[in-house]
Image (cartoon, grey):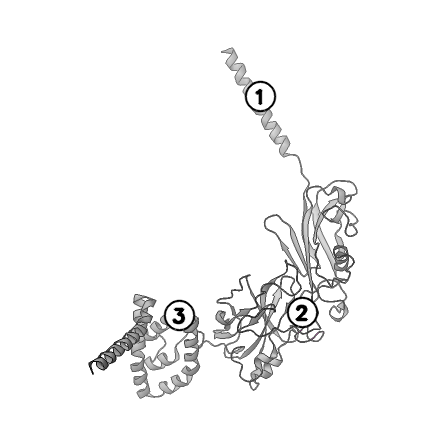
Amino acid sequence: MTFVLHYDRLIRVKIISVLIFILNFSSVSFSVTTLSSVTGASNTIISSTDGSWQVFGGIQGPNYAAYCTGGVTGPCNTCTGANGVDDGACNPAGVFADTPLTFSGTSDVATVGAKWNLCTTGGAEVVTPSANKDTMLTTTWGEICSELNSGDSDCSDALSTSTLYLGVGTDCSNLGTEKISIKFLSRAVDPTVQSNYVDCPSTPSGQYGACHFSLFPGDSKVYLEDSTFSVNTSFPAVDGGPSGITTNQIFFFFVEVGPTEADNDAYLRITNDSANSISTSFLPVANDSSLGGSFIDDLTNDVRYCFRMASQDTAKNIEYFTPLSVCAADPCDDVCMTPSEVVGILSDKKCFIATAAFGSEMDQHVQMLRKFRNEFMAPYWLGRKIVKAYYYVSPTLAKWISENDQAKKWARWMLWPILGWAELALKLGGFILLAPFVVLISCFFIFRLFQTWRFRKA
């Protein structure tokens, strides 16, 4: 009995000792260094897996004074036709060799004389360290380019040896394990040189970016026709860019067409000058270039717009604009479009002719046609083309039908076969849509067999 009590006491002592060790171990502090922001870059991306950073510079040539009127204090918008050419490459966050690049972060490293350092993988100093760990590390793009590209201080060449480490220590030899990996990527474009794509209804090689599009009207929006949206065989690669810089967005510049203005005249007014009443919109695009169902919204119904397309890369450079020759005459129905609540085939609006024939857009026949349109026509390219043609002629016919009782009777009579077809498709499935074609083909073959039989009998 005595042994059991002593053993029990020993177990309790061991448990208490383990708990004390765990509590003491958990109270030990570990140094943590984090990078909270990078200012002066065109774009930054933080990896969700390892916390590494990618810092992008869309280099806009040496002449920063033409764009940065207040001095080089950060990225500048070079998408201004007044400073470059109207369809020259541009960047809403362009940088120059003199643009300051500032790294801000926190660290609980307590080493005397610790400061922020930017170092190579081999532990060599790249730029002058900060004054101490409580101040930010500031350099310029020119200094980064000069160090990484062997003296290329104007950043005219894309960065090649680009991975550096940021950390806190007395120098680059003792940053510890908390240093942050930063990959610098840059691409230089010239805002004073035209950058138009070669229009490509079929996909050519030897070019870059998106290169053909057409639009379809909707309710307060226009849709990008997926079947006519084309990219070059090199997509998403960019001209002269490193592997880490690719096309990732499709930009649209657009203007309203004046009441008495021709499409081609309005098209000439579209530039990359976002500060001169030129509206912009963008569509994110994956590496497979799929943009099915994409649209530009917040437009005004019954107002005509004209659009020019361009491609944007991960360094924010915008280039490869739609050439003006695409809209050389009036009208330009592929690139100029009038959104309307009437022609929005993907919205729940009325059908002109059916409404005129049956007297109300709430009539059950009209609602059935609307449902048929949304389920069996709108999702498919051929269906959209048919509906587009219908809406082109529909308003004029509908006006005539609504004012003529006899025309209403004839319109209802002509709509009955379509209504029957639509009802069968909605109840039995889309395969019923093939029924008329099967019947026609069968009749053709029966007729041919009959003709052959008569010929042989004769």
Q: Which residues are magenta?
A: 83-89
Eye-nearest disc, 2 or 3: 2
Q: Are marks 1 and 2 in contact (CB under 8 Å)?
A: no
Question: Is 85 in the magenta?
Answer: yes
Q: Earlier in the sequence, mark 2 or mark 3?
A: 2
Q: Few, some or many C-alpha atoms within 10 Å of disc 2 (few <14, some 14-19, many ≥20)?
A: many
Q: Position of residue 204 (x, y in %)?
A: 56, 70
Q: Is residue 180 above or below residue 99?
A: above
Q: Few, some or many C-alpha atoms within 10 Å of disc 3 (few <14, some 14-19, many ≥20)?
A: some
Q: Are marks 1 and 3 in contact (CB under 8 Å)?
A: no
Mark number, residue 374: 3
Residue, far left:
457
Eye-nearest disc, 1 or 3: 3
Which quadrant of the structure image shows residue 153?
bottom right
Residue, far top:
2
Q: For mark 2, what is the residue?
A: 90
Mark number, residue 13: 1
Quadrant of the snapshot with the C terminus: bottom left
User: Mark 3 is on which residue type?
Assistant: Asn
| Mark 2 to mark 3 CA distance (whole Å) | 40 Å
SS label for mark 3 = helix
User: Mark 2 is on which residue type?
Assistant: Cys
| Mark 1 to mark 3 CA distance (whole Å) | 76 Å
